[in-house]
Amino acid sequence: MQSRMQKGAFIVICSDVVPDALDQILKYKEAEDNFAIHKEDFPTATAI
């Protein structure tokens, strides 16, 4: 799953099952730790 969230963004997850919500938060946190910005992320950027 690809996310459009900015690094360090505040997210809110609502769940009626706390362990599932915590697992989801940990998954997002691990993905954030592996976050990298690539040239392809900015299709309208032009080279100078």
Image (spheres, grey):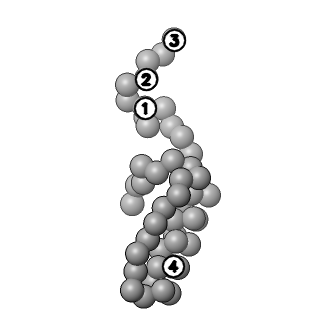
Return the residue found at the far right. Answer: 33
Task: Say what secondary structure mark 4 lies in.
Answer: helix
Residue 15 at x, y percent in the picture = 40, 80
Q: Secondary structure at mark 2?
A: loop
The residue that appears at 51% across and 65% down in the rendered structure is 28
| Residue 44 position by quadrant | top left
**Disc 3 to disc 4: CB gap under 8 Å:** no
Density class for disc 4 (Cα within 10 Å; few <14, some 14-19, many ≥20) is few
Question: Which tag is nearer the camera, tag 3 or tag 4?
Answer: 4
The image's mark for residue 48 is 3
Q: How many marks?
A: 4
Q: Position of residue 7 (x, y in %)?
A: 56, 50
Question: Looking at the picture, does residue 19 appear above or below residue 14?
Answer: below
Q: CA distance from mark 2 to mark 3?
A: 9 Å
Badge 3, how many Cα within 10 Å: few under 14, some, many 20+?
few
Question: Which amino acid type is marked by label 4?
Answer: Asp
Is residue 45 among what the camera can see? yes
Q: Which residue is mark 2?
A: 45
Calculate the distance from the C-alpha at mark 2 to the C-alpha at mark 4. Answer: 36 Å
Quarter of the view holding residue 46: top left
- The amino acid at mark 1 is Phe
Distance from Cα at disc 3 to Cα at disc 4 = 43 Å
Q: Position of residue 42 (x, y in %)?
A: 43, 32
- Residue 14 position, x and y percent, is 40, 75
Mark 3 vs 4, N-terminal side: 4
Q: Earlier in the sequence, mark 4 or mark 1?
A: 4
State the residue in front, 45 or 9. Answer: 9
Q: What residue is shown at x 58% (from left), y 65% (from top)?
A: 30
**Does residue 29 sit above or below 14 in this rendering?**
above
